């Protein structure tokens, strides 16, 4: 019995170590963002909000931040709409070439972002669409659709397929059934998809680096800082971005959970 | 509308169907498939006097593959990806095993949430933080100096690159392994124990085969992510020795060698496709029972 216990402790310690490894850079970045030193190390040597003031006043950060928000919102809306439409098509229809259709929808995240960025830059520059915020949007939507589609498709899989048929039999046409049956049922996953795709777009740096040109987004700015070697501003930027992303994720969680709770109450 | 229940599976293709089906097809054809096709076309273009010229010339393919450092870089990147995938899978396994079998449901839920969190932090920021932790006077060496060790050179080494790869892949691999193991029928494990199967033997004869699909898929994802990663080898590995992703960026930076970058990119995509399909084959292969 006791050897089982020892093994269990060892395994749990390993799990703890894995958690520590994963969270070390996240927590340290947060701590170092308040360090006054240019080369932050241990001991910290004081507390300062200097790096936050620096990024707040730096001419390149705020526009990048605004670009990121703009791109994130537009990407979220477009990719969630397309993701919903594709998920619904997959749910309801069977047609020739469906596997190809699904591959088109789900493959982009398996292509390295570096290559997606390169490909988009080459392609968009040929059709003269490169170097503006909209080129980031085109590329990010491609990358975000699978996430939105997967979330909404999972929700549709929970739906009783007879519900839609019942609406049709009661005289609703397809559009009416969509509005009164499908949309209300999938609404929480639609909001979750909006938040998730916005978070993905908000964090994505490689595609944006290639396609954004002069309209750089915030992660691209971080990449530029990183290229210029040590710059604790990254910690401050990272902490701000982390807070926003987590807020979006938690919002998505709450929306999904509240819905589930509501169902339980109704049942 | 009273012609009986409709056949859900074969509705007619009308305006309604097109409205929902077409956006994805149009968008991905225009901004995903067309760019990829164009990438292949671009590999046959040439650069003359720093100007890109439409052409049909295999010069980029020939010149890249005749250089030994390109071949070396290709196999090095393959090796790094394999090392990261196998290393990460091995390191992740005890953790996901502990999570699946040695943790209460509450702990499991908390840990899942914690392993999802990194997906929403910037990978760039995490790599930058590793830089500040790993460099000569960084936090890790300070900790080592307290116990009278070091300083060690972590940055600009393979070790640094691997730390970056692990940062990128560990949460995903643990989650995928965990989900595949948490679905294993506990009776199976119980049965193995009752039949006198030892602990390690149970793990390798019962649990690993049952969770095979998830374990292989997790390793494959790790390979895909690391094989194409630019950030870790550049900022933690110091950019030397080269990987394919650094080669792409260098080709673009030095003299606008877009066609060469395109060749490298096409080779990378082809490699990933081969690896992914091989992995899928092994992940979903059903072993024929021995007779």
Image (tube, rainbow, N blue to C red):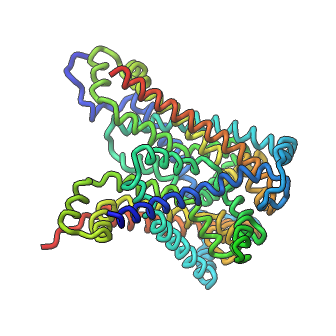
Residue A191 placement (x, y as % from top left)? 52, 31
Residue plotted at (54% across, 51% down): B32
Residue A244 placement (x, y as % from top left)? 66, 39
Residue plotted at (76% across, 59% down): A226
Left or right for A103, reference B235: left
Q: How many marks?
A: 0
B259 to A247, vertically: above or below: below
Residue B219 placement (x, y as % from top left)? 45, 64
Residue A149 appears in view: yes
Picture quadrant where residue B152 is located: bottom right
B270 to A51, vertically: above or below: below
Residue B257 appears in view: no
Residue plotted at (20% across, 60% down): B191
Residue A147 placement (x, y as % from top left)? 50, 44
Q: Nearer the viewer, residue B286 or B123?
A: B123
Left or right for B256, reference A2: right
Q: Quadrant of the C terminus of chain B?
A: bottom left
Residue plotted at (43% across, 25% down): A183
Left or right for A38, reference B132: right
Left or right for B255, reference A127: right
């Amino acid at each position: 019995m006791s050897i089982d216990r020892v093994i269990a402790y060892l395994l749990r310690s390993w799990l703890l170590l894995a958690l520590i490894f994963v969270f070390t850079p996240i927590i340290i970045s947060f701590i170092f963002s308040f360090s006054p030193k240019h080369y932050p190390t241990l001991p910290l040597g004081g507390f300062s909000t200097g790096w936050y003031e620096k990024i707040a006043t730096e001419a390149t950060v705020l526009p990048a931040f605004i670009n990121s928000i703009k791109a994130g919102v537009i990407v979220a809306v477009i990719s969630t709409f397309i993701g919903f439409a594709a998920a619904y098509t997959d749910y309801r229809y069977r047609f020739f070439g469906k596997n190809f259709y699904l591959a088109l929808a789900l493959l982009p995240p398996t292509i390295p972002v570096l290559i997606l960025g390169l490909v988009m830059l080459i392609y968009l520059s040929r059709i003269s669409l490169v170097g503006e915020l909209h080129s980031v949007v085109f590329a990010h939507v491609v990358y975000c659709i699978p996430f939105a589609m997967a979330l909404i498709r999972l929700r549709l899989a929970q739906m009783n397929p007879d519900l839609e048929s019942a609406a049709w039999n009661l005289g609703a046409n397809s559009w009416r059934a969509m509005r009164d049956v499908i949309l209300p049922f999938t609404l929480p996953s639609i909001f979750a998809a909006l938040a998730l795709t916005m978070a993905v777009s908000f964090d994505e740096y490689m595609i944006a680096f290639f396609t954004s040109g002069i309209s750089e987004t915030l992660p691209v700015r971080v990449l530029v800082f990183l290229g210029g070697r040590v710059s604790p501003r990254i910690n401050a930027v990272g902490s701000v971005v982390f807070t926003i992303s987590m807020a979006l994720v938690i919002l998505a969680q709450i929306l999904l959970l509240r819905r589930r709770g509501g169902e339980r109450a109704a049942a | 509308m009273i012609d009986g229940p409709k056949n859900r599976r074969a509705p007619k293709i009308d305006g309604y169907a097109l409205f929902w089906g077409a956006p994805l097809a149009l968008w991905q054809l225009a901004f995903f498939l067309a760019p990829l096709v164009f990438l292949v076309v671009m590999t046959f273009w040439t650069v003359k006097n720093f100007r890109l010229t439409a052409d049909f010339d295999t010069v980029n393919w020939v010149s890249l593959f005749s250089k030994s450092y390109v071949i070396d870089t290709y196999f090095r990147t393959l090796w790094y990806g394999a090392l990261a995938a196998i290393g990460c899978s091995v390191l992740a396994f005890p953790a996901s095993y502990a999570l699946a079998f040695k943790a209460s449901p509450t702990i499991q839920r908390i840990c899942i949430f914690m392993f999802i969190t990194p997906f929403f932090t910037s990978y760039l920021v995490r790599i930058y933080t590793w830089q500040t932790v790993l460099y000569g006077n960084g936090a890790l060496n300070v900790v080592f100096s307290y116990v009278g060790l070091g300083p060690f050179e972590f940055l600009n080494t393979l070790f640094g690159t691997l730390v970056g790869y692990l940062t990128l892949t560990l949460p995903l691999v643990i989650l995928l392994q965990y989900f595949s193991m948490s679905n294993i029928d506990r009776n199976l494990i119980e049965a193995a124990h009752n039949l006198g199967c030892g602990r390690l033997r149970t793990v390798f004869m019962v649990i690993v085969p049952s969770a095979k699909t998830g374990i292989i898929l997790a390793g494959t994802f790790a390979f895909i992510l690391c094989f194409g990663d630019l950030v870790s080898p550049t900022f933690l590995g110091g950019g030397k020795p080269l990987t394919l992703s650094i080669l792409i960026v260098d080709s673009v930076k030095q003299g606008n060698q877009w066609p060469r970058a395109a060749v490298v990119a096409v080779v990378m995509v082809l490699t990933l496709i081969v690896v992914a399909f091989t992995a899928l084959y092994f992940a979903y292969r059903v072993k024929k029972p021995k007779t």
